[in-house]
Amino acid sequence: MKKLVVLVVALFAMPLFAVSVTPEVSTLGYGVSAGFGVTPLFGIRVAGHTGSYSRDLHKESIAYNGKLKFNNYGGLLDIYPMASGFRLSGGIFGNDNKIDLASKPGQTITVNGVPYPSDAIGNVTGDVKFSRTSPYLGFGWGNKPSGHGFGVTFDLGVLYQGSPKLRVQANPKNPALVPASFYTNLETERAKTENDIKNYKYWPVVGVGFSFSF
């Protein structure tokens, strides 16, 4: 985050056509971006997002509480090929997004096809993480670099976040009651699930905002 602040300060020190501030909502979370018009055809933006989304998930007979947590920030290069609001965008995001998982209590937990009583193994927790550095490509509409006043912004693109990495662990109250085979089956199930989600490398980005340029 310190790097993002330094970049914003440095950009404000540059000779600029216009500066815009945009609160926005997107599939990256709730956030704000600051845009800097360098020429009539060229601009730079810095952006950060946060937020969370919860839902129930199921794997075999295990019911999980799942929570997607957004925490990302980055810099974008905007090209305005027609010197209008239409822009092509590319950049890099620091990606700390993740998914937290926790099995629901009071159920028989089936791991790699083998059922285990939850009283013995406790609950199963884990998380899914992505590449810390994620490139972005997209297009959209925003205030042109030399414009001033209010406007609505729109962005459509994709964030490449690499193959998701899954971690899981059991949390037994008494480890002595856990069968030795459980941990082998848990790792087998983890590897199978990670392989199932390996193609979720691309995160679609759709965002809208309300911009003020001065």
Image (cartoon, rainbow, N blue to C red):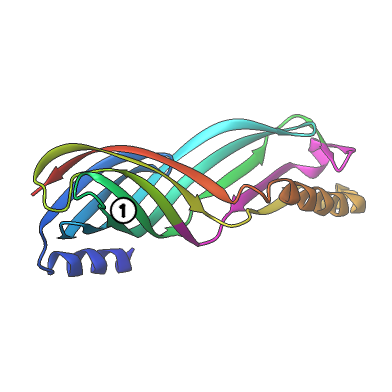
Choose between 122 and 152: the one closer to the eye: 152
Mark 1 lies on a secondary structure that is strand
Q: Which residue is drawn at 25% across and 67% down?
A: 7
**On-image quarter of the N terminus:** bottom left
- Quadrant of residue 112 within the rendered picture: top right
Q: Does the magenta stretch include residue 94?
A: no
Q: In this view, does 172 lie to the left or right of 37?
A: right
Please provide percent x and percent y for residue 86.
27, 44
Q: Percent from the top left, x then y, of residue 95?
A: 47, 57
Q: What stretch is highlighted in magenta?
A: 110-135
Residue at 31%, 53% (x, y): give it: 47
Residue under label 1, please give it: 47
Q: How crowded is mark 1: few (under 14 residues within 10 Å), some or many (20 or more)?
A: many
Amino acid, disc 1: Ala
Query: In the image shown, does 185 or 18 lie closer to the viewer?
Result: 18
- In the image, residue 175 above or below residue 60: below
Residue 76 seen in the figure: yes
Viewer-side residue, 69 vs 33? 33
Residue 155 picture quarter: top left
